Structures are given as structure tokens and as C-alpha cells.
Amino acid sequence: MSIAVIGAGAFGTALAISLAQNGPVTLWARDPGDMATSRENRSRLAGHPLPEGLFVTGDIVVAASAQTLLLAVPMQKLRGLLSEHAALLRQKTLVACCKGIELKTGMGPVALIKEVLPGATAAILTGPSFANDIARGLPTALTLACADEAAGKRLQEELTTPNLRLYRTTDTVGAELGGALKNVIAIACGAVMGAGLGESARAALMTRGYAEMQRLAHHLKADPRTLSGLSGFGDLTLTCTSIQSRNYRLGQSLGEGTHFDSGTTVEGAATARAVHDMAERAALDMPITAAVAGLLDNRLDVRSAMTALFNRPLKEE
């Protein structure tokens, strides 16, 4: 078993720390700085020492010598990474660890991997998980989705650690959608709380947002059971209720009318726009997604968005 994590942001570093409990792991950073000597990712995950079995490198050739590569890069940068290093990655097992929809194509990470590198084995690791919790060794459970059932079973065994329990599925579309769409709903929930509209409004948004997630999943022929699992309902619950979520914090800043650091990666922003376009083309009713897209593009404010949602025609649940 040889494993490398490509991308040394907070989540990639945390995964590498956890996986190093099983054996040697390589962590690739475009700019590793002093991580190898300080044994800490001070800029992205301070306070979590890197274990002895974790090797840090800035050489992609070294990292790509592993057979299983976890791609912990932002969704909107995934295509560039795959294209730039196609010769190194084309026959590998590639596990996407990003949650989102590509803005230009509407593709999820597994579909994108298959398009750019059809010879690679593609999978996605997703579910309720914060980098700090994983790095601290706190327990969580994740979904490992791979259309190749045999490869999925192998990955499940390789990537399960003392604090990460993996559940397997072959429904990559459902796992992609759950991980991507919950970020959109988290922005909405953060906005509601930032505007002081209350816990009840947040609960309503989470529930109706979950209905939107199921609606799009049904349209794209995903298994509805996937959305009721860790990659859908589980991740939705975590991301919509915690200040640790960057998507929630972005929404909160929109609701408060305060500044948000534009350098912070927030996958839900591009996903909201991509899914809104997708829903309009397919004539799907996704009003919360549309409201989030409007907030992000400064076409709506939080209170006018909530008013529009509450003034929609009454209907059965």
C-alpha cells in the first residue's frame, strides 16, 4: 500500500496525519515552506504536529510514485492539476477529497477525473468532517464512493484509520451531489443566522434545502439513499450548524453585512452558481439555491430573499 495526499491545505494535511497512523504517507504541497523541518503546517493547520510517518515534499514526481493519490485541492482547481500532471496520474487510483461542482461544466470531481484521465480509477471521499477534528484524532465516519466495487473495497480498507470509519457505495453521483449541495445550503443557513432570523428559520432552510438536494439527485439519477447518508444528510447537518464551516461563515458575513476574506476557499460559492444554471436549464425548482446565487451576485439581500421564499405559493410537503 502506498498513499500520497496531493494538496497541503487544512483538510489534506489532516487526512495525511490520520492516514499516517496506518503507515508511511506522502503529503505534497506546491510550496511546502518549512513544514518538513518544523513538522507542522503553521499556515493552514497550526497546532497539529506531523507524525513521523508523514513525509512532506514539493516534488510532484515523488508524490505521484504512490499508487493511491488523495486529491485535496479546491474543486475549481482540480481540472488544472489533472491536466498539468496527466502523464504522472493517468494510471493511478485517484480519490477526490473536494466538494463542489465545476462552474464551467457542471461536473462533479469523479466525472471530471474520468473525463480528463479515463485510464485512472476514480473515487470520492466525502462526508461530515472538519480538518481540526480529524487532525486531533476525533472520530468521524465518511462515505467512500467508487463505481468499481472491487477498487472501492480495497480503498475502504486502505483509507480507514483509527479515527476515520469509511462506508462504501458505488453511487458516485449521489456522493458528489451530497458533498457539493450541502455547501450551498450552509451559505443560506449562515446568512439567516447572521441576519438574526433565528434557529427556527435555519431548521426550515436545512429541511427544504435537503428537499432541493434530493430533487437534483433524482434528476441526475443518483440513488436517493446516498443523500440520506453521510455524504448528504450527515454533511448537511454538520456544515449548516458550525462556525468551523467556511461556507457557513461566508453566509454569516452576508447576513451581517461584514467583510469576508476573499482569499478563503469557499466551494459553495461557485457550486451555487453552477447548480442554479443547471436547475434553470432543467426547469428544476430550487429556490434556495437561486436565492444563494442572488446573494453572492449582490442581486438580493437576506431579508428580501427570505421574503421571496416565504411568499412562494403554498404547497404540500
Image (tube, rainbow, N blue to C red):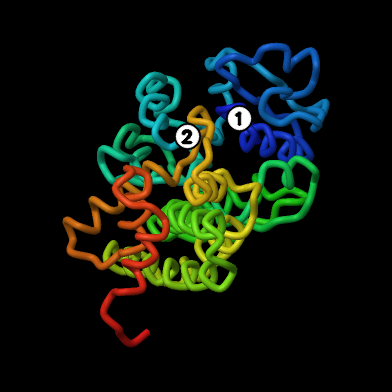
Label 2 secondary element? loop
Residue ID for mark 1:
9
In this rendered view, identify the residue nearer to me: 40 or 313.
313
Is residue 217 visible in this depiction of the protein? yes
Is residue 168 visible in this depiction of the protein? no
Residues tagged 1 and 2 counted as in contact (Cβ below 8 A): yes
Q: Residue at x 37, y 38 (%)?
A: 113
Could you tell which of marks 1 and 2 lies nearer the N-terminus? 1
Judge left or right: residue 281 versus residue 158.
left
Q: Could you tell me residue 275's position as x and y percent?
A: 31, 52
Residue ID for mark 2:
74
Query: Circle 2: is it few (<14), some (14-19), or many (20+) Cα within 10 Å?
Result: some
In the rendered view, would you say 97 is above or below 73? below
Q: Could you tell me residue 198's position as x and y percent?
A: 57, 67
Q: Where on the picture, by quarter, is residue 287?
A: bottom left
Q: Could you tell me residue 176's position as x and y percent?
A: 43, 53
Q: Where on the picture, by quarter, is residue 24?
A: top right
Image quarter where the N terminus lies is: top right
